Image (cartoon, coloured by chain):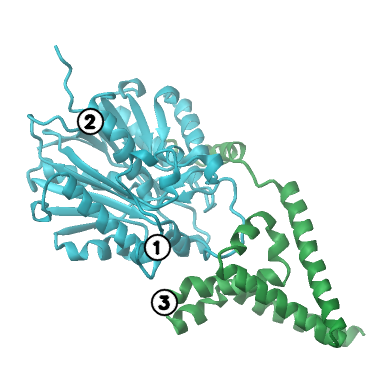
Amino acid sequence: MGKHVGEQSIKYDKPPQIIATATVVGPKEGEGPLARYFDKILPDVKIDSDTWESAESGLAKQGVELAVAKAGLNLADIQYIFAGDLLNQGIGSTYGIRSLERPYFGLFAACSTIGEAMTLGGAFVDGGFAERIVVAVSSHFCAAEKTFRFPLGMGNQRTPTSSWTVTGDGAYVIQQHDASKQSPAIVGSTAGKIVDFGIKDLTNMGAAMAPAAADTIIRHFEDFNTRPSDYDMIITGDLGHYGYELLKKLLADKGFDITGNSTDCGIEIFDKEQQDTHAGGSGPACSAITLAAYFLPKLQRGEIKRVLFVPTGALMNATSAAQGETIPCIAHAVVIESGVREKH
Amino acid sequence: MDNSEYSKRKYHQMVDRVSPRSNILVNSFKAFCSGGAICAFGQALSNFFVTQGATKENAGIFASVSLIFITILLTGLGVFSKIGKHCGAGTFVPITGFANAMASPAIEYKSEGLVLGMAAKMFTVAGPVIVYGTLTSILVGLVYYFVK
């Protein structure tokens, strides 16, 4: 079983392995720079549904089913599903996987939910409480706009710092460590605290979330006694172009330089100029599909050995925002290592 | 992270430096041109209806109804939001904005039913305009009555 490290971290004893992933995305994501890495690009955001919410549920279902199929397993082999999304009461996930008939834990940490799911799911697997689980998150641009902003058809202008919610689902099959396999493994996690620096601007989520990311990353370095250079890549979730700049400044103020070996999934997933996405991608699926489609294969092949994955989430809702509350944020960090061993 | 009020204040300054703002000059210019064009188009419509034998007052009403119809049609076709993205206040301030503000939630919330969805949510954006518009007109009416 793993152990508690430092103040907020877990080190897994027998690191749970990610044996398969699935990425199902919408058409806009399928036109972006990462298009060729995704498993399935859907031609239409409606996804054979009458409503945006059930469209997202469709994504959630397809993601889990595809991940399980890619692992060469049946749903019956999956003991638990840990999943979450942005919609009220988590209906994106629950309505999607209700027909799958697997034990389910619904999670919410906004756009950092995949980090929470990997941490809790990883602990579950490492602790021997499950052999095999699925962790998954989804988001849908239209459903998120409806939940948090304006009706789609409204002719208003988006500010330069606003982000574009990713339509997609990222699902991961995680299983108990098997030394004979070379799959990437979750070796440690740092759970984030809720950090609120008083940002109220719903169209500048990157600025709201950057302090939470910085807080978790610094805590991670202290708990594991590591430095930025110990990671081939530090990958934040959906800070976007401006939030990522702020994160680098916040970390530099504390003496950590991540300039050369870091990026943000919100920056990677869209082409800012071509796709008119302003600050970048956001939403739970943003980090989950970017990690699964783009970075995990690199870990799988051993091209990179160790990444610090830090999905970020803003924990407000439309009511709290209307009541003038500030935006509390959170970031969960997960260390994933390549299973490819050096040849001697 | 240092959670003190001082560091939060410092962070807000940093956010202001890093975050780009909307280009007010360009946006105002676009709004001026597009808003003006819509109003000119409305006037042209009004003149047209006069040539067709409508009274001046009725021609104005027909012009408004035409603009509302065109806006709602374009909203339904998903075109209006693309225009509004560039025109901003230019399309939002004239009667076109009001029509769009009612049509877009009506379309969006149709999935929740015709009563509690479409009809109720139709006023989420336009409702405040109606409430405060009515209030203001009452105030102006009172001032007019006593000051005249």
- Colour in which chain A is drawn: cyan
- Colour in which chain B is drawn: green
B13 left or right, relative to B40: left
- Give the secondary structure at mark 3: helix
* Disc nearest the viewer among 2 and 1: 1
**Residue at 49% of width from left, 53% of height from top?**
A326
Chain on which label 2 sits = A
User: A248 above or below B104?
Assistant: above
Q: Is residue A323 visible?
A: no
Mark 2 sits on what residue? A300
* Circle number at residue A4: none
Between the C-alphas of marks 2 and 3, the distance is 45 Å
> Could you tell me if the residues under marks 2 and 3 are in contact, i.e. CB atoms within 8 Å?
no
Q: Please determine if labels 3 and 1 lie on a single subunit.
A: no
| Residue A139 image position (x, y, % from top left) | 37, 55
Q: Is residue B38 visible?
A: yes
User: A117 above or below A293?
Assistant: below
Front position in the image: A193 or A229:
A229
Front position in the image: B49 or B35:
B49
B74 left or right, relative to B145: left
Front position in the image: B69 or A233:
B69
Badge 1: few (under 14), some or many (20 or more) residues near its Cα, within 10 Å?
some
* Circle number at residue B112: 3
Between the C-alphas of marks 2 and 1, the distance is 33 Å
Q: Amino acid at mark 3?
A: Glu
Chain on which label 3 sits = B
* Disc nearest the viewer among 2 and 3: 2
